[in-house]
């Protein structure tokens, strides 16, 4: 079963403990992703290179979402470890929610 894409114009909500973000998918279902999962699956050039060099962490315990900028087609998410380069297209967020 395929997850519906994140609805256009959907606002996202960061949880009170900054450990997850939730959005509404087309069809009305709520999609929630943890900060750790988002950080682990960042596809920015810096993170891809760190994976290639085998220096990317296996976990990010205690990571928090500190800022979210809605770019229309996706979200730019900043994390408590200082990482703020990742842009997460809404279609990618839907894929992450499936896995």
Image (cartoon, grey):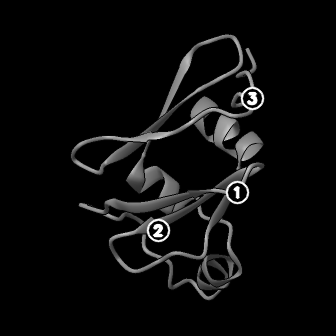
What residue sits 33% from the left and 71% below the top?
Answer: 80
* Disc 3 versus disc 1: nearer the observer: 1
Q: Secondary structure at mark 2?
A: strand
* CA–CA distance in space, label 3 to label 2: 22 Å
Horizontal arrangement in the rendering, residue 56 relative to residue 71 (left or right): left
In the rendered structure, are the residues bearing label 3 and label 2 in contact, judged by CB atoms less than 8 Å apart? Answer: no
Horizontal arrangement in the rendering, residue 61 relative to residue 90 (left or right): left
| N-term-proximal mark, 3 vs 1 | 3
Q: Quadrant of residue 14?
A: top left
* Disc 2 versus disc 1: nearer the observer: 1
* CA–CA distance in space, label 3 to label 1: 16 Å
* CA–CA distance in space, label 2 to label 1: 13 Å
Q: Which residue is mark 3?
A: 5
Viewport quadrant of the C terminus: top right
**Residue farthest along the top direction in this orientation:** 27
Q: Which residue is mark 1?
A: 71
Crowdedness of circle 3 by 10 Å Cα count: few (<14), some, many (20+)? some
Give residue 78's position: percent from left, percent from top.
Answer: 47, 68
Horizontal arrangement in the rendering, residue 59 relative to residue 87 (left or right): left
Q: Secondary structure at mark 1?
A: loop
Q: Quadrant of residue 10?
A: top right
Give residue 48's position: percent from left, percent from top.
Answer: 68, 76
Relative to 28, is 99 above or below? below
What residue sits 31% from the left and 40% below the top?
Answer: 15
Relative to 1, is 95 above or below? below
Q: Which residue is mark 2?
A: 78
């Amino acid at each position: 079963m395929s997850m519906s894409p994140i609805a256009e114009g959907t606002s996202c909500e960061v949880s009170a403990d900054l450990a997850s973000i939730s959005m509404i998918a087309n069809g009305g279902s709520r999609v929630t992703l943890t900060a750790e999962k988002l950080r682990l699956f960042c596809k920015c050039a810096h993170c891809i290179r760190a994976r290639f060099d085998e220096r990317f962490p296996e976990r990010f315990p205690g990571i928090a979402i500190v800022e979210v900028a809605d770019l229309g087609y996706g979200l730019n998410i900043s994390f408590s470890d200082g990482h703020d380069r990742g842009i997460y297209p809404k279609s990618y967020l839907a894929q992450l929610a499936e896995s």
